[in-house]
Every structure is written in structure tokens, then in C-alpha cells.
Image (spheres, rainbow, N blue to C red):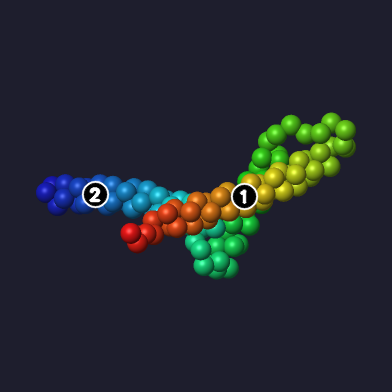
Amino acid sequence: MTQNTNRQENENNDSEDLGQSSSIDIRRKFQLILTLMASPITDETGSRTSVLAGLSTIFVFGTVIGLITPKNEALTPPYQTISAAIGYIYFMAWRWVKNIVVLNNSRTYLLKNLECQPF
């Protein structure tokens, strides 16, 4: 009986470990995705990974917003969705570029003001 009890305890511990490790894996993958999405803002090297992550983020968010928002009634049904998606992709691209420029300018301004001035 003692061996059966020990075996059941080990199986319970193994199942708890699997549950914890799967949640940790999901969290790490989610963190990696968020890091890639933010890489155009945080990464100043301009690597291919950063650029592709930024473009795909703009495309995905623009398409999702275009699919969710109300459509232009003057267009026929397939073109309503296509037009909305393209419009919001364009909007997201301009918004993303503007935010990056503002962040870079603020960093430059802060660095210039931190220089030591001789007396």
C-alpha cells in the first residue's frame, strides 16, 4: 500500500509540475511576442527582425480594426471590408511612425539637456 500511495503522490506532483511548466511556457511565448511587437520602438539597430515585426504589427492591428469598425455604406459588401482594412492599415502606419519619431526626439532632447555645462 505504501508503494501505491507514493506512486500516486509522485503522479500528482508530476501533473502539478506539468501545469506550472505549461503556464510558464505560455507566459514566455506571450512575452516574446510582446517584445517583438515593441521592437521597432525599443530596438534602434534597424534589424530585419525588428522591421518585419513592426510591419506585421501594423498590418495585423490595422486589419483587425478595419474588420471591427463600421463600414462605408456607399461601397458594395466585399469592398466595404477591404477599404476599411486598407484605411486602418494606412492610419496605423502613420500613427506608428509618428510615435517613433516623437520618442526618438524626446530621447535626443533629454540627452542634450543632460550634458554638463562648463562654468
At x 66%, y 42%, the residue is 64
Q: Which mark is drawn over residue 116? A: none
Residue 60: x and y, percent?
64, 49
On-image quarter of the C terminus: bottom left
Depth check, mark 2 against mark 1: the one in front is 1
Residue 66: x and y, percent?
71, 40
| CB within 8 Å, label 2 to label 1 | no
Residue 117: x and y, percent?
37, 59
Which residue is farthest left? 2
Residue in front for this viewpoint, 99 or 35: 99
Of the image marks 2 and 1, the number of the one nearer the N terminus: 2
Say whether residue 25 is left or right of residue 42: left
Residue on which disc 1 sits: 98
At x 72%, y 48%, the residue is 90
Q: Quadrant of residue 70?
A: top right
The local secondary structure at tag 2 comes to helix
Is residue 12 in view from this perspective?
yes
At x 78%, y 34%, the residue is 71
Q: Which mark is drawn over residue 13? A: 2
The local secondary structure at tag 1 comes to helix
At x 66%, y 40%, the residue is 65
Residue in front for this viewpoint, 50 or 68: 50
Say whether residue 75 is left or right of residue 116: right
Cα distance in 3D space between marks 2 and 1: 51 Å
Disc 2 marks a residue whose amino acid type is: Asn
Is residue 29 in view from this perspective?
no
- All told, the count of numbered labels is 2
Q: Quadrant of residue 85?
A: top right
